[in-house]
Image: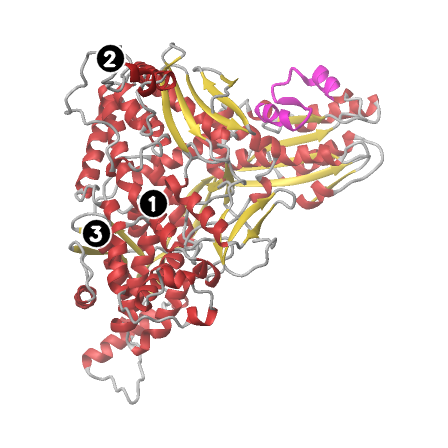
Amino acid sequence: MTLTPELLALRDEIRGYAVGYGLDFFETVFELVDFEQMNMVAAYGGFPNRYPHWKFGMEYEQLSKSYEYGLHKIYELVINNDPSYAYLLEGNAIVDQKLVMAHVYGHVDFFKHNFMFSHTNRRMIDEMANHGTRCRRHIEKYGHDRVENFIDMCLSIDNLIDYQAPYIQRRPSKNAPPKSDVIEHDVPKLKVIKPYLQDFINPKEFLDAQKKKLDDQKKAEKRFPEHKERDVMLFLLEHAPLESWEQDALAMLREEAYYFAPQGQTKIMNEGWASYWHATIMTQKALNASEIIDYADHHAGTMAVQPGRLNPYKLGLELWRDIEDRWNRGRFGKEYDDCDDYAKRKHWDRQLGQGRKKIFEVRKHYNDVTFIDEFLTMDFVRENKMFVYMFNRKSQNWEITDRDFRRVKQKLLDSLTNFGQPIIRVVDGNYQNRSELLLEHEHDGVDLRMDYAREVLRNVYAFWKRPCGVATRIDDRGVIVRFDGTDYEEQKYEKL
Amino acid sequence: MSLKINQDHSRFKQIVRGKIKQNLKKYISQGELIGKQGKDLISIPIPQIEIPHFTYGQKDTGGVGMGDGEIGQSLGGDPQDGDGKGEAGENPAGDHMLEVDVTLEDLADILGEELGLPRIQPKGKEQIDSYKLKYTGVNTTGPESLRHFKRTYKQALKRHLLSGTFDPARPIIVPSREDKRYRTWKVIHEPFVNAVIIYMMDVSGSMGDEQKELVRIESFWLDAWLRRHYKGLETRFIIHDAVAKEVDRDTFFHTRESGGTMISSAYKLCAELIEQNYPPQQWNIYPFHFSDGDNWSADDTKVCMDILKKRVLPFVNMFCYGQVESPYGSGQFIKDLRETLGSEETVVTSEIKDKESIYGSIKDFLGKGK
């Protein structure tokens, strides 16, 4: 439903404020929906039309249940698209609608300007609908169960994509001129003018090293894939024996995975940014005196911190404010960092007034990992009482284990790196020369969840149609867990 | 907005149903559902319907939080990321157990499908045609006792307003004959099939808690299935050792007596119940008897067979005897029963060794479709 005249007027008002602060967003279309529609749209991730799949039904079931039980209510939902679509819940108080609008404009500004989103499809709403149509066509042709099964398989590996790939060039593009076919057989030597200098300029160690390099290169060329491949979905798309409709479905789901990835990688920044702007717009411009209590209640609810929960809204908002403050007062640089005097640091003010400018800059060029890495300071961690928690096996409880700045930061970065997911790569598509597929888990101290890993292997097998394995470490032993179509087995593996 | 959620939602429900079916044996043998019974719904915990991913193992990773607390202090509960209001966020810890609500009827259907139970053919054509009255509308005529006050008042008010006789200072409304409105009703006929389950249980010293638990679980499922077929299902409970008495459900499952066992006492009482309350032309009668099969004497067993043959079997749809295994009992009764009455079509016997065998036993009892 389109907005009521009253809400339309409010929207124009809020948009005016947002533009006035320098926010720059795509045209944003607000839809007024009731809670049932809201749950539906939310189950589909904000898109009105997607491929048919039971997981959306499950999502819907959970959302409606928790709404019925009064556990939670979705206030705001916005999608990265041009024009952007956002949903307002019918029957919310006017002050809530204002807040949500301000919040949404913050998000859309972020979508438009943050570099992580620069590669995303801004016509995704159409693309999603197309995916739906294509998928339904496959269902008509090949049957519901078959297609659904296949989608389940694809979804099970949809986190095995290369999250950095859109921003860098991993491999020479397909159009690049092919490497010369002539294989260098001679070990390259440095040019020697005087023959008697030969042994000095090209000593034996150097020649051996050169030879080894050459050998490795040759070996690499024989390897398949030539380089370890992070984008497992792509690898399977290109090399697994799939029917054309299967390829189509896999490509579709891969595209969606890449589309959603930046939102996961900028959650803290994005929610923080939107919260920063709803707070700014509401408190400085949009609030009536009579609405202050309701606003404060709602805002506090969103920002509430419960022990053991990292609230991205809260953390993000505080970080943005901290950055603004630091650049307003010049609390950065060598001089400030070297200052040991607590009182002096506290009242440090170089009258820079660069805060606003700085945060606009930061929202453009950072993602959560680099954001935290650069702007999470010791003072911030202390002031915001951040801590590390771990599971204590003895007491079977989650406990606070540390408040040390470096460890808090490290833990936070660890949990954000690669989306907080284990790094899995294809290392060999012809393992032991039996065209078996070998994946490798880059073990960083935490074991994989094995029951899931086995299920995923079963799915990978269904793509590859030959035995598949994943090399990992379990309880500090290197193993390959291999699935041959009927049974699992574990082999020792020491290369890791 | 064209939303296809209904399709996806019903597909999800289908999957849930499949999951329940898959795990039915487990649910049956663990008896965990019984405590979860609400009025019409049962919530069933389903092991994750999740798409597996490569993820980190649980309970190792930990995370970062904000707030007060000493080092070593417990967080209380599983940590979760998300906003303060508890939005569904990624959960670093703890398995999601999905709780789905299923109606008792659905559950019975699933049970039926999974066990391949035939639908019960209610016995006897003489179904009681019960009817009830339902107020469905409003009419301008009727008895004063059914006058609809509010509607009448509204009509009168309208008339006063229209005719201009309404005085806000003295808002007195006098309904005339045309203003009056009366409730009208419809007669709704309901074909009604009556059924009664008579549970009998041996509570003599040799029946321990474990044995009673078996009976409890089994009776839950028998109830569910029969309730699916008979709207007005009654249940009666008889416990016995050397003497029998009728009790309520709670007592039935929690009484422990000592003393010997005279099964005939229970059968006698059962026969009396049937004779007094449940004329077989109108009732579908299901006696279930659970015992460890350790009857007092061979003579009493003979009496039992006699009562069954003459006073019970001719009137019931089915007579079910379930023998639970007990470390004390000889388990002779089931053999005697099979020997004497095994050829009778209405007699069903089943041995329930442990929780695992409840599944099979339900199938034994309900597999005949009577």
Q: Earlier in the sequence, mark 1 or mark 2?
A: 2
Could you tell me which chain the residue with mark 2 belongs to? A
Q: Secondary structure at mark 3?
A: helix
Q: Is residue A85 visible?
A: yes
Residue labelled with disc 1: A264
Q: Spot the residue most to the bottom.
A: B169
Q: Is residue B231 visible?
A: no
Image quadrant in which the N terminus of chain A is located: bottom left
Type of the residue with mark 2: Glu
Please count the marks in the image.
3
Type of the residue with mark 1: Gly
At x 24%, y 58%, the residue is A360
- Residue in the foreground of this view, choosing between B17 and A222: A222
Q: Nearer the viewer, mark 1 or mark 2?
A: 2
Type of the residue with mark 3: His
Q: Earlier in the sequence, mark 3 or mark 1?
A: 3
Q: Nearer the viewer, mark 3 or mark 1?
A: 3
Q: CA distance from mark 3 to mark 2?
A: 47 Å
Q: Earlier in the sequence, mark 3 or mark 2?
A: 3
Could you tell me which chain the residue with mark 1 belongs to? A
Q: Which mark is residue A184?
A: 2
Magenta stretch bounds: B334-363
Residue labelled with disc 3: A113
